[in-house]
Image: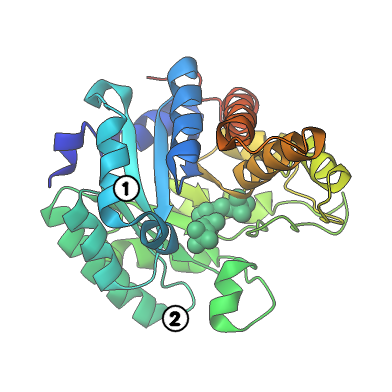
Amino acid sequence: MKYSDFGLVNTNKMFTNAIAGHYAVPAFNFYNMETLTAILTATRKMHSPVILSASESAIKYMGADMLLGLITGACIAPNEQIALHLDHGHSLDACIHAIDLGFSSVMIDASHLPFDENVKLSCTVAKYAHRHNVSVEAELGTLSGIEDENTKSNYSSYTNPADVVEFVKRTGVDSLAIAIGTSHGAYKRKSDDESLRFDILKQIAKQLPDFPLVLHGASSIPQQYVETINKNGGRLRGARGIDTTQLKRAAKTNICKINVDSDLRLAFTAGVRETLKTNPSDFNPRDYLGAAIKNMTDVCIDEISHIMGSKNKI
Ligand code: G3H
Ligand code: 13P
Ligand code: ZN
């Protein structure tokens, strides 16, 4: 299936517009009807372009046919500027599978490999993807969280600005995920003093003017949902995200894609926990999943308005 048959677009024009307009396109992860509904309700209300991200494990969870059924059911029109993106593809096969399914964008995450091997794999993916007019994101540097689970390391290594031009030239990728202090999951910072490395971002942007950069691990971990979860039987002690002012600042630079998954997971879980705790006799999933959709929609709207700057950018 071709992605244009679903009304999807690749990320090329989105990113050109985002760099020129000094905003970032949100990339929200989805893995079921509830997450997809919330993301699309919010982005349609805000007239924002959006990247629908599905990881390999999310594709496995939904099943490829169900995923495509959801995308078909979303009745997407090309002028909505919606991309379907493989998040953290770990192999050429995973990227080919996604492209063959109808994804319009893929990430090849070979950042844990030595530089030359990262180049080789990213370049192979880019060649295949470009034959199908699919855009490609690669990564240099390692974020802590899920990526260091792969490498068994427990540190995050920032992207070296001296490497980026050679990497982009040799791979031919369309965007580059960089490590400047973000990390995946709900435990990103131990204190308020920890800041993103805007100095590194500035050096990278100087090397690669007008080239689209991507920020992973960019959830802000809204404390209202952490508190709701903790008040209603959960235990998330010390969960803390990236400062929203810093994310907003990043969105105005060449960072033109900002990835958010954990914030939606928290909003979802808070809605379910609160509804069930408040109504112990309720066993109608549409009640607690409805609350989850409402919370996730609110998060997307809030982040589009206050972080991404992508409202009314279609
Ligand atoms: O950055 C990764 C995303 O949060 C996806 O996580 O593989 O559990 O779907 P997942
Ligand atoms: P968070 O865990 O900060 O939401 O990051 C999501 C992400 O980077 C998806 O690729
Ligand atoms: Zn990520």
Q: Residues within 10 Å of mark 2 (few under 14, many from 20)?
A: some
Q: How is this picture coloured?
A: rainbow
Picture quadrant where residue 47 is located = top left
Picture quadrant where residue 12 is located = top left
Q: Is residue 47 left or right of residue 8?
A: right
Q: Nearer the viewer, mark 2 or mark 1?
A: 1
Q: Which mark is residue 67?
A: 1
- Would the CB of label 1 be found within 8 Å of ligand 1? no
The residue lying at 62 percent from left, 30 percent from top is 287
Q: Secondary structure at mark 1?
A: helix
Q: Is residue 140 above or below residue 257?
A: below
The residue lying at 46 percent from left, 45 percent from top is 30
Q: Which mark is residue 113?
A: 2
Name the kind of residue labelled 2 in the image. Answer: Leu
Percent across and percent down for residue 119 are 33, 73
Q: Is residue 55 above or below residue 26?
A: below
